[in-house]
Amino acid sequence: MDMQNALETAEKHARLRDGEKLVDVAAVAREEQKANEQGYALYKLKNKNKALFVQTIQENLDVLIRKEFLTNAELGFLFSLMPLVQLHSNGITDRETGQFMTVSEIAKYLNRDRTGISATIQSLLVKGILFELVDSQEIKEHKRSVTRRPLFMNPEIIYAGDRNRINATLSKLVIEFDKLERKKALLSWKLWIKNGEEFGRLYSRKSYLEFKKLK
């Protein structure tokens, strides 16, 4: 086989391989129309962007700012914590190890005094912006926590992940100990998890109030 024939053969094989990869666009269009009629949508998958992100829930943050619910120092501290918010869990974790961070470790990361950081964290816990998991048995035995207390950011304010797939344990924690609601910081978007569902999600305040009535 001469060079010309070899090139033609290779090109033919390439076209065949490409043909196997092609999508029947007309067929897709027909299926899309059927899907749209039933309330669904078809879309082309794209390569996922691997850049880590965290998002603020703008309308809720606006409520807190207008109400002067947070001090400027607390707002600045929350911004500083954003790089530490773990994807999906919303826990405050070490970026390298993935371990939950202690108050001392957070202070070291921010190059700040531990006493001041501890006071700010305590204030945000009281206000319901941060949450912590405490071992009740440990408290009963030692009268205080002696191990790490995982800290979590309230996903109604700042969340790393899909707002429609919020961790169930975190959702239940926020709903049960909703200090923002008790302090009359009435957010526009509220977290709720329906019975039997695997994840919580953010709902409009109107929907949230309806869910509470049915509870």
Image (spheres, helix red, strand yellow):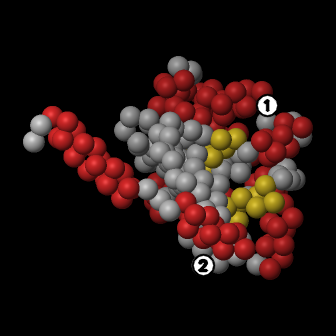
Side of 136 relative to 11 (left or right): right
Q: Position of residue 167 (x, y in %)?
A: 56, 60
**Crowd band around label 2 with a 10 angstrom C-alpha radius: few (<14), some (14–19), many (20+):** few
Residue 194 versus residue 69 in the image, above or below: below
Task: Name the residue type under label 2.
Answer: Gly
Side of 78 relative to 186 (left or right): left
Question: What is the secondary structure assignment of the residue under circle 2?
Answer: loop
**Crowd band around label 1 with a 10 angstrom C-alpha radius: few (<14), some (14–19), many (20+):** few
- The N terminus: image quadrant: top left
- The C terminus: image quadrant: bottom right
Q: Position of residue 81 (x, y in %)?
A: 59, 33
Q: Is residue 126 visible?
A: no
Q: Is residue 16 visible?
A: yes
Q: Position of residue 159 (x, y in %)?
A: 63, 46
Q: Residue furthest right?
A: 66
- Compute the Cα span from label 1 to label 2: 38 Å
The residue singled out by tag 2 in the image is: 196
Residue 178 versus residue 46 in the image, above or below: below
Task: Name the residue type under label 1.
Answer: Thr
Tally the numbered discs.
2
The residue singled out by tag 1 in the image is: 71
Residue 35 versus residue 149 in the image, above or below: below
Residue closer to the observer: 173 or 32: 32
Q: Nearer the viewer, mark 1 or mark 2?
A: 2
Tag 1 near tag 2, CB within 8 Å: no
Question: What is the secondary structure assignment of the residue under circle 1?
Answer: loop
Residue at 22 percent of width and 38 percent of height: 7
Residue at 47 percent of width and 39 percent of height: 50
Residue 57: numbered disc: none
